[in-house]
Structure formats: structure tokens, C-alpha cells
Image: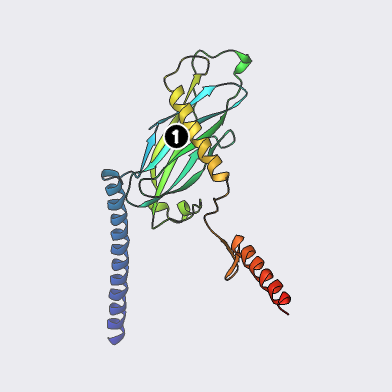
């Protein structure tokens, strides 16, 4: 009799545990569905403002590497890390491929693309490209150094800002986007050259602990030399 009761109690306990585990799984699944639904209905607010907003304009020059540009501005109140991706990594690349922007900061990124020769060297009637560029963002705490691994480590927090399509235009024909593109490329080139220059010397250079190498040291050495000469003459 006791054995039967013990078996029934064990069966009842196991059944309760299985029921609880099933309920936990259903609860987790339900929470996951609610989270996915919430992200769909209430998408995260974008952190970056792009100019151009949805397209990259490239001059059509077959057999050459051409450039486009896009201004990226952080419109949020947090530091934001951004990253480029492309569907054609063998023929396209971005400079910089990613970076960190403080609130209100902007940068002009340069996008490089190699233009293939048309079939039979015939001039196409319509310039089309299936290449896409994706810009992603990630809010971070404070100014941190950009590393691509951030987007893998915090993939649940990554936001797809925009997918940019490619627009080709004939460089020898009037185009409303040409002047703006040239201005952005000039700004990007100037910023690149400025980063290459060594920082200006704003004061004495301190090497090690308390060692100052500048003109003050030279003056001190000259002063000590004069004092030694006076001491010798006074003997």
C-alpha cells in the first residue's frame, strides 16, 4: 500500500515538474514573440541622418575606380558606432568602413566602386546596378574605439539605419547631383589630409616622468655654463 502511494506521489511530482517546464517554455516562446512583435510595431528610432538619404551616386567610367560620398550625422543624444556593409565586397569598399560619432557629430564617408566594362563594349541605354550598401548603428556608452566585433557582441541592439542603392550617371553629361558629390568628396579629402598631419606643438613635450625636452632645457644649460665660467674667473 505504501509502495503504491509512493509511486503515485512520484508520478504526480514528475508530472508537475514536466508541466512547469512546459509552461516555462511556452512563456519564453510567448515573450520572444511579443518582443519580435513589439520591434515590428514599434521600431527603434534611427540614430543617424544620411545625405543622400537613400542612394549613392557614382560617375559611369568603365574600367575605372570611381567614388561616391555620403554624409553621416549622429542625431541622437548618445555616442553611436556605425558600420558599412555591401553586397559587392570584391569591387567596393568604404573609407572609413565604420567609426564612432559623438552626439551632433558628422562625417563624410567615401565609397569606392570599380565599374566593369559593358558586354561587347557597347554603351548601355540604361545605367543600372544591383549593388546595395547597408549602414548599421549601435548606441554605446561614451567615446569608444570602433571595432567591427561590437556588432556581433551586441547584435540584438544593432539598428539597420538604411540600405542605399547605387545610381550611375554619365560624367560627361549635366547632372544635378554632380556638384554636391564633388563638394562632399572635396570635404572628405580635406578631412583625410588633416588627419595625416602631425598634431601642432602646443607646449613642451614631456618624455618619461618629469623630463622636459624643449628650449627651456637649452636655456638652463646655457645659464649653468655661464655660471661655471664666472666661477672659474673668480678663482
* Residue at x 54% of width, y 45% of height: 195
Residue at numbered disc 1? 70
Residue 160 horizontal/vertical position (percent): 39, 43
Number of other residues with Cα within 10 Å of mark 1, as a class: few under 14, some 14 to 19, many 20 or more: many
* Residue at x 27% of width, y 82% of height: 5
Q: In which quarter of the image is the N terminus?
A: bottom left
Examine the image and state in which quarter residue 209 appears: bottom right
Q: For this rendering, which residue is in front, 23 or 54?
A: 54
**Of helix, strand and loop, which one carries label 1?**
strand
Relative to 165, is 216 above or below? below
* Residue at x 48% of width, y 34% of height: 187
Q: In which quarter of the image is the C terminus?
A: bottom right
Asked whether the viewer can see residue 113, the reply is: yes
Asked whether the viewer can see residue 214, the reply is: no
Residue 190 horizontal/vertical position (percent): 52, 37
Residue 162 horizontal/vertical position (percent): 39, 37
> Which residue lies most toward the bottom here?
2
Q: For this rendering, which residue is in front, 187 or 178?
A: 187
Relative to 125, is 93 above or below? below
Amino acid at each position: 500500500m505504501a509502495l503504491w502511494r509512493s509511486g503515485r506521489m512520484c508520478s504526480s511530482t514528475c508530472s508537475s515538474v514536466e508541466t512547469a517546464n512546459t509552461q516555462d517554455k511556452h512563456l519564453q516562446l510567448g515573450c520572444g514573440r511579443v518582443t519580435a512583435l513589439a520591434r515590428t510595431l514599434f521600431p527603434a528610432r534611427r540614430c543617424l541622418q544620411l545625405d543622400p538619404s537613400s542612394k549613392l551616386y557614382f560617375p559611369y567610367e568603365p574600367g575605372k575606380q570611381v567614388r561616391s560620398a555620403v554624409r553621416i550625422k549622429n542625431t541622437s543624444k548618445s555616442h553611436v558606432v556605425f558600420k558599412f556593409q555591401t553586397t559587392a565586397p570584391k569591387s567596393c569598399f568604404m573609407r572609413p568602413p565604420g567609426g564612432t560619432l559623438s552626439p551632433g557629430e558628422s562625417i563624410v564617408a567615401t565609397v569606392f566602386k570599380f565599374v566593369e566594362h559593358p558586354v561587347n563594349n557597347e554603351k548601355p541605354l540604361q545605367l543600372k546596378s544591383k549593388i546595395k550598401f547597408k549602414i548599421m548603428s549601435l548606441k554605446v556608452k561614451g567615446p569608444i574605439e570602433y571595432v567591427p566585433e561590437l556588432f556581433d557582441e551586441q547584435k540584438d541592439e544593432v539598428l539597420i539605419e538604411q540600405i542605399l542603392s547605387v545610381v550611375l550617371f554619365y560624367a560627361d553629361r549635366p547632372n544635378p547631383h554632380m556638384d554636391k558629390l564633388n563638394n562632399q568628396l572635396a570635404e572628405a579629402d580635406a578631412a583625410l589630409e588633416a588627419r595625416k598631419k602631425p598634431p601642432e606643438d602646443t607646449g613642451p613635450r614631456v618624455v618619461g616622468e618629469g623630463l622636459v625636452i624643449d628650449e627651456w632645457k637649452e636655456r638652463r644649460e646655457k645659464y649653468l655654463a655661464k655660471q661655471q665660467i664666472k666661477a672659474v674667473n673668480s678663482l
